[in-house]
Image (cartoon, grey):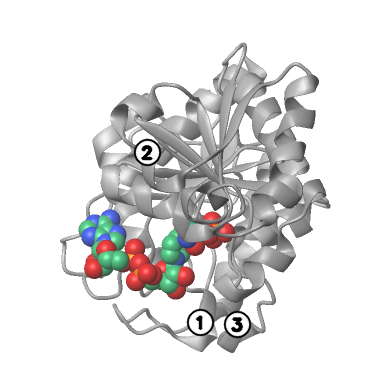
């Protein structure tokens, strides 16, 4: 298969070391092309530097080399690296869009470091990738073997959630998720569950009105299109094992409603996937972990799962 493009992420975080650890664990079974400054990789990494991404060398950690300037100091982001980190993502998108690489797997970025160092105007990869792809709406999914969750609103304050949630946003989120479950995950007839916004999904209007005002009707309208969709469900009771067995993806109303259950169930093995892009993008579900960077403590399990999922999705989508 074609290599998976791996953007370096924040050089002061655990991104470079988990990429190398994942490569070592996966061996040649899964070709990778890492994009970043080779000076930020752990000492002793068996690197092959290439300027031609189609010239991939087996048995080596293949690097599309970029010069970020100053060396990285573990745990302390350098504003001088910010533009290089952003450019590495854009390069990986470009290579994947043109078919040189099969998919894109992003190592974690430090959003504040990119904003401070290079005026990065996006809350995260998800929104930046949508911008690069010219996609009107994309969807963030977090997936592990036991659960897939989708936050309908992502990186906004909790106080802004009720205003941001609209019937159109919920419809589009469900629609993109439903299509991706078929196209990228190979699920023939996806089952979707939708969480309520309020405790007990509003308790018949006694604990919040959004369910009765529009969420019930939006779900009913989606069901009428033939979709297997249920909700709004009480968010506190929809993530135990028996409940999870009844759906393929849970649509949640805000970031923490979705991410707390999956990071609790499988912090090490969760994968972040962006749905609705013209190319495949996955990422580990954790962040830059400055507190342990450069100490050999970082667990590459989520990075490995992200790379495997990217390869599987490319296989399903492209054959
Ligand atoms: N896809 C991305 O680019 C993501 C970026 N972030 C960013 O990362 C930065 C730090 O975020 P935090 O909330 O502190 O979350 P974090 O995931 O970086 O760290 C939370 C805790 O988990 C530990 N941890 C994380 N990954 C680990 C691994 N692979 N092995 C062992 N321990 C691990 C850390 O040491 C820390 O104690 C923020 O700027 C955030 O925006 C967070 C999530 C995803
Ligand atoms: N909390 C998830 C997260 O921050 C990942 O964001 P993104 O960089 O994948 O958009």
Quarter of the image where one finds residue 14: bottom left
**Residue depicted at 32% across the width and 25% down the height:** 242
**Which mark is drawn over residue 251?**
none
276 up-or-down from 244: above or below = below
The residue carrying pointer 1 sits among few (fewer than 14), some (14 to 19) or many (20 or more) residues within 10 Å by Cα, namely some
CB of residue at label 2: within 8 Å of ligand 2? no
Q: CA distance from mark 1 to mark 3?
A: 5 Å
User: Which residue is nearer to you in this view: 99 or 284?
Assistant: 284
Residue 127 in percent (x, y) is at: 68, 60
Which residue occupies 57% across, 86% down? 117
Q: Position of residue 133 (x, y in %)?
A: 78, 50
Q: Residues within 10 Å of mark 2 (few under 14, many from 20)?
A: some
> Which residue corresponds to the image point at 77% horizontal and 59% vertical from the top-left?
131
Q: Quadrant of residue 288?
A: bottom left
Label 3 neighbourhood size at 10 Å, few (<14), some (14-19), many (20+)? some
Task: Indicate which disc, 2 or 1, sits on the residue closer to the N terminus.
Answer: 1
Left or right: residue 171 compared with residue 87: right
Q: Which residue is mark 2?
A: 239
Q: Secondary structure at mark 3?
A: helix
Q: In what element is the residue under mark 2? A: loop
Question: What residue did someone put label 1 on?
Answer: 113
Q: Position of residue 236 (x, y in %)?
A: 38, 47
Spatial CA span between label 2 and label 1: 34 Å
In front of the other: 271 or 29? 271
Callouts 1 and 3 close, C-beta under 8 Å: yes
Mark 3 lies on residue: 115
């Amino acid at each position: 298969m074609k290599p998976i493009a791996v953007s370096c992420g924040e050089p002061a975080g655990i991104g470079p070391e988990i990429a190398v650890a994942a490569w070592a664990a996966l061996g040649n079974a899964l070709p990778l092309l890492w994009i970043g400054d080779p000076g930020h990789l752990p000492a002793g990494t068996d690197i092959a530097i290439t300027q031609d991404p189609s010239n991939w060398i087996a048995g080596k950690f293949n690097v599309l080399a970029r010069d970020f300037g100053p060396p990285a100091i573990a745990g302390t982001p350098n504003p001088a690296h910010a533009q290089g980190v952003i450019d590495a993502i854009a390069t990986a998108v470009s290579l994947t869009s043109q078919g040189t690489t099969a998919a894109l797997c992003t190592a974690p970025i430090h959003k504040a470091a990119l904003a401070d160092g290079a005026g990065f105007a996006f809350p995260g990869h998800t929104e930046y990738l949508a911008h690069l792809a010219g996609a009107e709406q994309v969807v963030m999914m977090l997936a592990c073997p036991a659960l897939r969750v989708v936050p309908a609103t992502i990186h906004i304050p909790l106080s802004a959630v009720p205003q941001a949630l609209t019937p159109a946003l919920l419809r589009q989120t469900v629609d993109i998720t439903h299509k991706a479950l078929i196209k990228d995950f190979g699920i023939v007839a996806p089952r979707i569950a939708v969480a309520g916004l309020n405790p007990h999904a509003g308790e018949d209007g006694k604990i919040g009105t959004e369910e009765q005002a529009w969420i019930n009707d939006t779900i009913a309208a989606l069901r009428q299109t033939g979709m297997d969709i249920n909700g709004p469900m009480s968010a506190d009771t929809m993530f135990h094992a028996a409940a999870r067995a009844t759906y393929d993806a849970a649509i949640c109303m805000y970031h923490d409603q979705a991410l707390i259950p999956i990071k609790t169930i499988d912090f090490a093995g969760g994968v972040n996937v962006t749905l609705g892009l013209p190319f495949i993008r996955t990422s580990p579900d954790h962040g830059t972990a400055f507190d342990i960077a450069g100490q050999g403590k970082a667990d590459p399990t989520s990075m490995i799962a992200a790379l495997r999922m990217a390869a599987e999705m490319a296989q399903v989508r492209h054959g």
